[in-house]
Amino acid sequence: MGLTLVRAFKFPLSVSILIIILLIGSLSPAIISNIDDDFSSYYNLKTSTSNLVDVPVWMVGDKWIYETQIDVTPALAGTDLDDPGVNIQLLEGDTSLIVEDIRVEELDGIKSLIYVLTGGGFYQGNIFIPSDVAAPLIEGVPSFLVPDIDGNLAADLTIERHVRVSDLAIVYQSQSIDVEVQNIPLLNTYDIGLITLEQSYSPPIEKYDFPLEVGNNWLMNHTESTVWSGQSSVFPLPEPPPPYDHEDKFEVTQLGDPDVPYGCADSIRIQQVNLTSGLEKGFNWYCEEARTFAWSYEIILLGMVQDLKLKDYIEISRPGNSMEIELPFKAYPPGYEVDVSISNPSGDGISSGQFRFETVGIEEDFSIPSGTSQQSNANINLIINEVSDDSDTTYDVGTHGLIAWDGYQGLGVKTLIIDPNAEGIDLVARSSGIVIERTRGSETVVLTSVTGFSAQRGDTLSLSFPVQNRGISASTLTTMEINGPGGSNSFNINSLDAYEEERITLDWDVPDDQSFGFVSFGYIVDPDNNNVEVDESNNVGATPQIRIGASPLALNEIPLPVYTYENLTIDGSESNDPDGGQVRCEFNIQTIDGAGNYWQQTRESDDCTLIYYWSDDGNYIVNMTVIDDEGDRVTIPIVATILNQAPYVNLYSEFDEVRIGEKITINADDSGDVDTILPPDVAEVDITWNYRGGDGFDSCQEGAFKFNCTFIPDLEGDITVTATVTDDDGDSTSSSIIIKVLNIPPQITEIKAKYLENGQTLPQDDRLFWIVNEDQKISLHGTAYDSANDIDDLSWTWSSVNMEDNSVAWQLQDIGSESTVEVIWPLSGEYTISSDVADDNSMRSPEEVRWIKVQNVEPVVEITSEISDAGESMPITLSGISTDTESDLELLISCWDIDPSVNSDGNGSANDDCDYEGNNMTHSWDFSGEYTVIFHAVDDDGARSIDQIEIQVTNNPARAKISTNSNSVFVGEQVFLDGSKSTDSPKDKSSLIYLWDRDINQDSNGDGIKNNDIDYEGVNFTTEYLSEGEYIIQLIVKDEEGCNLDDTRCVTQIKIEVKSRVGGALGGVFASIEEDLGINVEIQLLLLILIFLIPVLLFTRSKRQASNPNKESWQEIELGLGYTAPMPMAAPNTSQFGLQNNEINSPQTQSGNHSGPPIPASGLPEGWTLEQWSYYGSAWLSQQQEETTPPSTENDFLQQTEITNQDNSTLDLLSEINYQENTKTDPFSSVEDDDFDF
């Protein structure tokens, strides 16, 4: 298909040149316009400290001179001069500016002190315009008389500029320009005219927001108003443009050397970015030494580039003409009183003046006492409010210049910073102030928002991390911690005064194996909180994301030779970026003008394709530079071979397809013959059209021999349109274009997904997947395009398919030009959403596919029971609630894990067991302690949510209870005591210990405490008493935690009354014998008589036995009726005590082994034998102790002693006895519910 070029608009040459010259003289940023939219280790640590750069003071007579270059070619794009044959070289000259006056002007209602600067310059450069381009532009001269213009473009410029003293903001400027073209053949000099351009700005443009420091940035919205005046002999002045609003951002990017003739090695770079396009409009290097910019590089009106570099600064002497303003603090919060001190450092000269705080309208006279001492100051006191300025920042309310002025030349200026946080110490990690320098080979660049933040393997990144004290008090020594891909490091930070800054600079060599992607460095100031700060939230900072990538690959097809004036295509579209992303290209083209001058022209291309032509044959070098998203560049040379050509014709149509009944126009303006010598007003070639075949058929609406052909096709199918051009030599060239006539299918123009509840658009992830939850209803909106007769009846088909298993989630139909359907996905996963439309001819649109990620919603569990404690073996019921999305409820599994420390089911983790399933569980714990219970739920996607509760299981102390067969017995009669009715938890019941004290008023173990004896251990205890009286029996029941005698529940007592039988003690003995042995009283009396006779008989036989030494002593006594020796108390049968002969606690006597109790120190009682003592000694000792020992009041905790085990064989005989229970009163029994129902 042929291509044609659109014919450019034609302006008179004088107008075109005037526009160029008007732009040349502009030194003001106010006419600035947008640029065309077309793992290693750290090393080489450096530290530095920087301070703020404040507003300078200019003196009348200060002068600056700049080397100046202006490139006007960008402004020619789209004009008649945008032609490969036109060559306008850089315009060069010197620009000077001088301070002419200092005076007061009213700006937006505020009286403001301003500098008035004047200056100008002379600029010239070579210009060549081919005659065929120049002829239509020069009015009043026959085109055949217009030669090639090969001369000089010259301009004289006069400037007046008004700058606000308090902050150097530009208020107004005017430019008077006298333009002419010199050395034109035949015409000599062509006078364009004298034009004046006036520009004013509201509010004034703050190119510097003092005080300056790296990292500062501010927004500036202002309106530019333009007025033209002057005269021209060849054309009227254009109408002034309407006021234009600018929205710009200024960024302080680095501190360094701008490399200008004057020096200024320590300058600050400030770049200006258009907020709408994001493109850089220019930059300035501010030089504190020169008190103004050292280098200004700006994109000005229509894209022209203006480059000013300081070459000389002529300074007026300051001593005697300047004043100093001092403030106690760097910054102040609103409402604070400010003490302003004004002095004359030289001690002479200025003695009085006016203090000006113009933003709030303060004008106050002052006087400075003579001398140079500290008392030789003028003091002004004022209270500041929250007064903002026109440069919006995020770190202060406003910065305002305070002025001391003597009314003429003497000046002093100081910036007042109003900061709500200007108190105490405030260390700030200023992320905006991080400076990143990238070194690649021998080239080092500073990375900014304009250049982008990128690096490659093998690059060195030098990162400067600032910390600033934005408080008013000095900070103490502290540290900064920096984390990045090279590791983590900590560095010392010195004490910083108010608004003082220190920087830590690290170099990082990007490793050769560093993966592509983004890296960043973060840092924290004062991580150990060594300083008490006003605001610690700003102690953390980070670099922008730095993309690690590779240089793009420059690939192109070798272009074939073409003829002169024929487009040659250099196709670099295969160029790519190995690390991903898009690439664009810059082509630096070697070309030639009509005078044979070689020069360079630059073209940019987003698709890396260049279409260019040359006016003369030859081989030309085109340098193609491929630039990726990160700004990495690679350049290759390409040779373009140009041949002479015959007549040409290129057809162009806006459409290659058309519906029946609609017009289409074929354009052949791009046709001609470079060799034809004809007057400019005569066409170079003749043209004929043919679009029906055969001998030709001229039915173009424009008629024959025109370079446009409009017709209406009436047949469906392909139509070939052919144009034939013939030059003056009769050579012809034909070109054809095919137009397809068809019924265009409908098109889907837009698909949106919105939340049903609020209508907001669904978010997307980095893969462009919409994000939605299971069972969340959304609406899909589609818009389609088609012809008017089809649009309302379009048929929509919507469907969604699971990308994992290709199952269809749903399918819907709809009708209309727009479609809205409501859908949900019950299952999580990734799905496609497909949509297409069909018209009434069954022509379908291409299928539009979107993607959506359906996220599983985790179940929600909550334990609703508020139980937190329970007793041992006491069942408790816990309840919970588990919820999920509707589609997950049916398969939702709720479980209780009663012991998360044990993996009871052997699957998963220890805390996901399903000991009980469901929302409720009933459980008891056998032992005291703290138990964790986890309630969890798992949905069909395996998502699990848990809740837990801590249950405190407390020990139930044993409750002692005694049952007895009788509370009243006779002397010598057995008492059966049963402790089995004592209670405890089921697990503790079997391991209870039962300790019996048969008489709490008798200290049987000899430890001095009566009620702690352990006379027997066991559930049941049988005992008897040999003397009458009341006996208190005590039972202590112990579980695994023992028993504290202060706890009345585990200790109980019972009182037993022991009565004597008829006959006193002797009758009791008789009754015991009769009961145990079955011997009646009469027989016992006979035996008693015999017993009394024994002593008599022994007495009578004593003489006969005296000679027998082996006889017992009692055998030697002769019995007689008068014998009155005391008789020991009769000992009961040992079986009545339930004791065996092998008792554990039988002590040894002094005289040897025997079965009785220990013999008293005084010996056996009178008349007692060892055999009698063995049987009856214990009873004798008990009687003696009751008579001599007072009742014990101690109630010590029982000591463990040797235990007497009881023979419980008698229990079988007592099974039918009705027991009586007697327990100690429990003071807590009325308020405790410790019964065991299960």
Image (cartoon, helix red, strand yellow):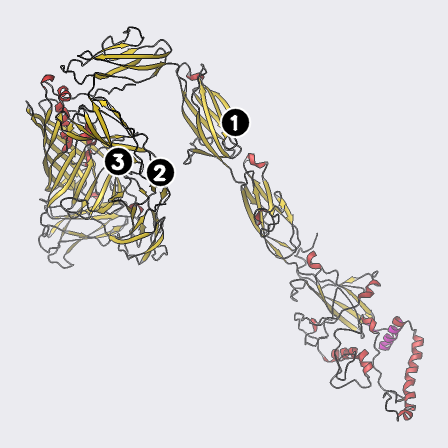
Verify whether residue 853 appears in magenta. Answer: no
Q: Residues within 10 Å of mark 3 (few under 14, many from 20)?
A: some
Tag 1: residue type? Answer: Trp
Residue type at tag 3 = Thr
**Distance from the alpha carbon under mark 2 to that under mark 3:** 18 Å
Write the start and end of the magenta stretch as one range.
Answer: 1059-1074
Q: Position of residue 130 (x, y in %)?
A: 14, 23
**Which quarter of the rendering shows the N terminus?**
top left
* Front-lying residue, 1107 or 198: 1107
Mark 1 crowd level (few <14, some 14–19, many ≥20, 10 Å Cα): some
Q: Quadrant of residue 880?
A: top right
Looking at the image, which is closer to me, 926 or 804?
Answer: 804
Splitting the image into 4 quarters, where does residue 1159 fall?
Answer: bottom right
Residue labelled with disc 3: 635
Residue that badge 2 annotates: 579
Residue 753 locus on image (x, y percent): 44, 29
| Residue 1064, magenta (yes or no) | yes
Residue at image point 81% right, 78% down: 1175
Q: Horizontally, is 644 left or right of 764 in the view?
A: left
SS class, disc 1: strand
Q: First in sequence: mark 2 or mark 1? A: 2
Marks 1,3: beta carbons within 8 A: no
Toward the viewer: 903 or 962? Answer: 903
**Residue 210: x %, y % from top left:** 22, 46
Residue labelled with disc 1: 810
State whether residue 176 is above or below residue 876: above
- Which amino acid lies under the numbered mark 2 shown in the image of this protein? Asp
Sequence order check, earlier mark of 2 and 3: 2
Q: Nearer the viewer, residue 462 or 313?
A: 462
